[in-house]
Image (cartoon, helix red, strand yellow):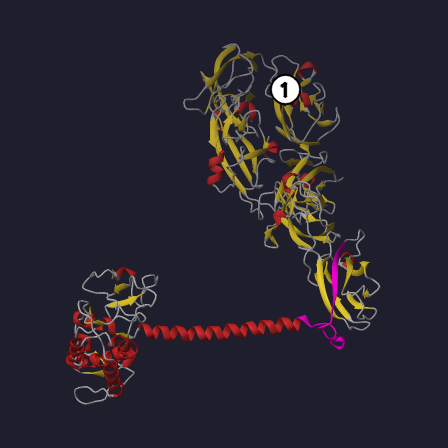
Amino acid sequence: MESLLLPVLLLLAVLWTQAAALINLKYSVEEEQRAGTVIANVAKDARDAGFALDPRQASAFRVVSNSAPHLVDINPSSGLLVTKQKIDRDLLCRQSPKCIISLEVMSSSMEICVIKVEIKDLNDNAPSFPAAQIELEISEAASPGTRIPLDSAYDPDSGSFGVQTYELTPNEMFGLEIKTRGDGSRFAELVVEKSLDRETQSHYSFRITALDGGDPPRLGTVGLNIKVTDSNDNNPVFGESTYTVSVPENSPPNTPVIRLNASDPDEGTNGQVVYSFYGYVNDRTRELFQIDPHSGLVTVTGALDYEEGHVYELDVQAKDLGPNSIPAHCKVTVSVLDTNDNPPVINLLSVNSELVEVSESAPPGYVIALVRVSDRDSGLNGRVQCRLLGNVPFRLQEYESFSTILVDGRLDREQHDQYNLTIQARDGGVPMLQSAKSFTVLITDENDNHPHFSKPYYQVIVQENNTPGAYLLSVSARDPDLGLNGSVSYQIVPSQVRDMPVFTYVSINPNSGDIYALRSFNHEQTKAFEFKVLAKDGGLPSLQSNATVRVIILDVNDNTPVITAPPLINGTAEVYIPRNSGIGYLVTVVKADDYDEGENGRVTYDMTEGDRGFFEIDQINGEVRTTRTFGDSSKSSYELIVVAHDHGKTSLSASALVLIYLSPALDAQESMGSVNLSLIFIIALGSIAGILFVTMIFVAIKCKRDNKEIRTYNCRIAEYSYGHQKKSSKKKKISKNDIRLVPRDVEETDKMNVVSCSSLTSSLNYFDYHQQTLPLGCRRSESTFMNVENQNTRANHIYHHSFNSQGPQQPDLIINGVPLPETENYSFDSNYVNSRAHLIKSSTFKDLEGNSLKDSGHEESDQTDSEHDVQRSLYCDTAVNDVLNTSVTSMGSQMPDHGKDWFDVNCNNRLQRTECL
C-alpha cells in the first residue's frame, strides 16, 4: 500500500523556475460521506495561496493526476472538490495507518497545485471471529503456563479503531495473554493457569470478547469449548518458536522456503508429527505458500511479488497422532527479496498524454509538462535517472518524486511548428532496466510576425488618358502566422498628390492588394506620383508594414501643337516687310508649343500652300525668310500656309495663314535680324512702372493740398460760428492762409446746401448740393442740411440773394450769417473798392500791441477776444476785396449814392459784422 502512495506524495515545497510554481493544499474528509459532498473550494484556496488563475477561461485549471478518480473529482467550472460516491476507507486503504487520495492540477500558466485528501476512519466496524465456536483439546497433563494460540478477531477499521484487546469470561482455570504481530495486529494466547484433572472436570466453556478502541468500543464474541483429554506423555516441540527466512520474488512454484521439524520422543502414532498452518494465516498467504504435513517443508505455490507484499507471517502447528495430543506452535516470517524485475514507468501529466501544446512566445524556463517516473522496485533497483533525448529547445529538470520539462531556447512556430520529444528512464538495478516515452510538443501561434511585402518598392508604368477603374498592379504581403494572425488586409496611407487626396487617384482591394486607377491620368499635369500601401494582419494587437508604390504616367500624343508666333487672329497673321528686302530677309519666326514630351512634343515646321516660291521656312526653328528680291512690279501681298506638326506615332499638326505685305515706307533692316521681344517687354514694363510712380507722387501731393484747404478758415461762416462757440482762455492766431471765401458755383443758381457740423472748428460749411461726401472730420450723423431756395425765401435766417446784373454770377457774401438785404439796390464804386482792397493788401496787420501779424502759421498768444475780432475783420476785408476787385466794377454803375455812403460807413469798420452788400 505504501508503494502506491509514494508516487502521489510530492515535496512539500519546491521552488519552480520563472513561469512555474508548486502549491500544496491539504484537506480531510470522513469516510462514508454521500456522493456530492463538497470537500473544499480548491479554486478559492489556490488563488489565496498565489495560484494564477485566468478568470476569462471557463475552466480555471485542469486535473492532470488523480489517484482515485472514481471517488473524488474537481468541478472545472466552480473549482469545488466533491465526492463522486460513498468512500469506504476500510476497503480503500485496509489497515494502512493513513489513507490519502492525491490530485494534481495545472493552470494555464503551467503552475502545479498538489492536493492531498486524507480519508479519516470511522469506527463503523465491530471485531469479528472467523468461526462461531473455537474447539480445543487440552491434555490433563498440560502444566500451568502452557500457551495455546487462539484464532484472532478481524476488524476492518484501522489504528485505534481496530482490535485492541481480548477478554475471557469466566477465567478461573485459564487466562489470556495479548500479543502483537509485526503488522500491528493483535492476537490472544490461551494460558493454562491451573493443573487440569480430566476425572474432576473434562469440559470447559468460555466466552472470548474482542474489543476495538472506539468510544464507546465495539466488540465481537466467540465461544470457546475446551475438552480435557487423557494424558499423552510427550508433545511435539519445535526447536525455535520463531523462524525468519528470505525468498526472492518471482521464485517459481515449489521453490523450498524452509523445512520445519518438531520432535516427539514418543513412539508409534504418539511420536508421529503432522504439520499444518494455524487458523490466523489468511487466504492470500495460503495461496502463496504451502506446508507438507509430514515433512514440514514450506514451499512457494504462487507468484511472489515484492511490490505486492514483501513480508509474510506463517503460523505453523505441529501435532502428533497420539490421543490427547498437545500441539506445538511456531511462527515463520518469510521476507520476499526484491529483484530488478520492473522497468521504470513514465507518466506524462498533461491533458493529452500524447500531445503537449506550448505558445511560441513561451520564455526560457517555462514549464510545458510534468513528468512522473516510477519504479516498483526498491533500493538501487527502483532508483531512476531520466534524460531528454535529441537536440531540442527543451530540458528536463528532476526533483525527488517528479520531473518537469522546461523551455530551453527560443521557439518559433514559423520555423518549427512541432517537436517529437523522447524521455528515457533507467534504473540502477543489475541488469539495468530502462524505458522510454515519446510525445509531441505542438507549438501554437502567436502574432509575432509583421506582414512582409514581396518587395519594398513597387513601380508601374501606365499611359495617360487611361480608363478610370483600370487595373494598375497588385501588391502582396505574406504573414507566416496562422489564422487571423496571418490574415493580411491592405489599405492606402493617406497622402496628397497635387494638393488632392491620393484616394481620388487610386484605390486598393483590401483583400487581394489589387490597385486600380480612379481617374484618367494626364501626363502634362502629373508625370508620376508615389503613395504608400499599408499591410496589416488580423492579430490583437495587429502588426503592420508598408511598401512604396510609384506610378509613372507615360506621355501620349494627345496635344496638338499651338502656334504662338506670329500672333494669329482667326488663324491668320499679317506681316509687313520692306519692298526692297533682299534674299534671306527674316520675314517672321513661327513658334508653336506642344505640351507633350519627347517626340510627341518635338515640333517641326513646313509650308504647305501659298507663295512658296518666294519664301522658305526652317523646319527646326520656324524662321521664314525670303528667297528672292521684290521689285516695283511685284504684287503687294503674298500668302503662305505654315504647318507645325509633332513627331508622335500619330502626328498632330496645326496650320496658320500668314499674309505678307510689301511696304515701301519701311526700310530694310536686314542687319538687325530678329526683334528682341524680351527687351521690348522689359522696356514696356519699366515705362509703366515709372508712370505709376509719378502718378502716385502727384496724387499724394494733391491729397495733401486738399486736406490743407479743408482746414482753411471759412470767411462765410466765421462770424456765425464765432458767436456760438464757447470761448477758451487760449486762442489761436489766424493767418490769411486760413481764410477762404466760398464762391457760389457759376452754373448752380437754384440751391446750395449748408451743413452744420459740430465736430469741425467752423460750425457751418458750404458745399455743392450734389456732393456726396461730407467735409473732412464731419460725421454724417452730426450734420444738419439746410436748403436755400432762389424764390426770395428765408431758411434758418440765412438768405440767398442774386444780383440782377448782366455780368457773370458773383459769389455770395455772408456777413455775420446774414446776406445783404435785397430790399434795396446798391452800386459799388469800383475805384473805391479797388483802393480799399489795395490798402488792405498793402497794409501790415498788427494786433493791439502793435505786433505784426504773419500771413501763415499759428502762434499761441494770450490775446483777448476783441483782438481776434480785429484780426478776423482785417482778413475778411482782404478776402472780400479780392472778390470786389472782380465784381464791384460791374456793379458800381448800378449802386446809388446812398448805398455807396452806407457801404463806406458800415463796411469800413468791421466787415464781417456789418450787413454788407
Location of the C terminus (image quadrant): bottom left
Location of the N terminus (image quadrant): top right
Q: From this viewpoint, is residue 354 visible? A: yes
**Which of the pair 660/826 is nearer the observer?**
826
- Residue 556: % across, % down: 75, 52
Q: Classify mark 1: helix, strand or loop.
A: helix
- Image position of 64 with respect to 326: above or below: below
- Image position of 606 with respect to 581: above or below: above
687 within the magenta span: no
Could you tell whether 313 is left or right of 459 in the image?
A: left
- Image position of 322 with respect to 899: above or below: above
Could you tell whether 694 is left or right of 254 in the image?
A: left
Tell me which amino acid carries mark 1. Asp
Residue extending furthest toward the bottom: 850
Q: Within the image, what quadrant is residue 96 found in? A: top right
Residue at mark 1: 283
- Image position of 132 with respect to 638: above or below: above
- Residue 854: % across, % down: 27, 86
**Which of the pair 123/496 is nearer the observer?**
496
Q: How many marks?
A: 1
Q: From this viewpoint, is residue 733 visible? A: no
Q: Within the image, what quadrant is residue 510 found in? A: top right
**Crowding at mark 1 (Cα within 10 Å: few <14, some 14-19, many 20+):** few
Residue range in magenta is: 653-677
- Residue 445: % across, % down: 65, 42
